[in-house]
Amino acid sequence: MDGILLIDKPENITSNHLVQKIKKATGIQKIGHTGTLDYFASGLMVLTVGQGTKLTQYFQGLDKEYTATGELGKETDTYDIMGKVVKQSPCNTSEEKVREAILSFKGEYSQMPPPYSSKRVGGTRAYKLAKKGIQPPLKPKLVKVYSIQINSVNLPFFTITVSCSSGTYIRSLIKDIGDRLGCGAYTVSLRRTKVGDFDVSQAVPFEEVVNRKAVEEMIIPLREALYFFPEVVLDEGFDKRFSFGQRFKIPYQIAGLVKVVSKEGILLGIGRVDDNQILHPVRVLSGIGV
């Protein structure tokens, strides 16, 4: 059983705990996730199953979409509702200024990750340092906010839907909006609605993952799941050469990463085509010749 599984994560469960519960319910041990969701957050998680776990990294870089609610005038140590309030400021602003501040973040900007995050600092997760009272020496990262839709402004609260690059922290974005208004803000609720072209409307509620048979019916095959890679179909003989890790020239005018498929429709793995049309195996799956 190889592919991806779209799960609608409920609030108040960690991403790792969710994966462990699914493993226990189904008996499937090779399950991974392609990006965590905060404990208090809900929404779409893309899980890799079977040989899909070998391709997890290729799903991690997909763009994301979130819907979030922030509250102005308060800051918490975690930048969200789970933390303790560390600062309160009067927020004497107008709805018009709030809207202006929100929309000002559309485009690229240098974002500082939250101290309570899974970012690694010298091999240690930032949140582990933060829990010990150590301020993690995090560095800002350039992120892209493709679009921001303002769903509502009901001061001191506002709700937005954000389409952004992978690695963007919505908790930081909410705080940055509050800082721009001079009163701070924290995230009250957060829901991930899209990962690449995958939508939460396609996802299965976590509570419905009760056994192996249920999962088998929900699996999206890897060939279909890797929609974001161009496809190279190999003739008989060349499929075996790819599976044995050999390089060879192909009649395709493309370059970069590709998904490699046999004429029988079997996904053989991920390859890289260089400028000389040479196909290099990058990640070989168990298939023909293996």
Image (cartoon, grey):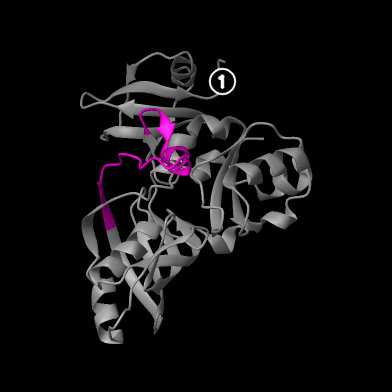
Q: Is residue 162 above or below residue 20?
A: below
Residue drawn where x is 44% and y is 54% of the image: 78
- Residue 148: x and y in percent read 32, 69
Q: Is residue 130 left or right of residue 145?
A: right
Q: Quadrant of the N terminus?
A: top right
* 181 horizontally vs 207: left or right: left
Expressed as whole percent of the image width and height from the top left, the position of residue 62 reads: 39, 48
Location of residue 65 in the rendering, given as x and y in whole percent from the top left corner: 42, 61
**Where, by quadrant of the figure, is residue 222 drawn?**
top right
Answer left or right for 176 relative to 211.
left
Q: Callout 1: few (<14), some (14-19), or many (20+) C-alpha neighbours within 10 Å?
A: some
Which of 277 and 143 lies nearest the eye of the viewer? 143
Q: Is residue 150 visible?
A: yes
Question: Would you say residue 173 sits in the magenta stretch?
Answer: no
| Residue shown at 25% from the left, 34% from the top | 253
Three-letter amino acid code of the residue under disc 1: Ile
Q: Determine the secondary structure under disc 1.
A: loop
| Image: 80 above or below 248 | below
Which residue is depicted at the point 36% across and 73% down? 73
Which residue is pictured at 70% across the width and 43% down the height?
22
Residue denoted by label 1: 288
Q: Quadrant of the C terminus?
A: top right
Residue 122 drawn in magenta: yes
| Side (left or right) of 262 relative to 170 | right
Return the residue nearer the eye: 260 or 189: 189
Residue 220 drawn at (x, y percent): 59, 46
For the record, the magenta segment spans: 121-144
Q: Quadrant of residue 105?
A: bottom left
Report the number of numbered marks: 1
* Visible residue check, residue 264: no
Q: Nearer the viewer, residue 63 or 15?
A: 15
- Which of these two is toward me, 240 or 101? 101
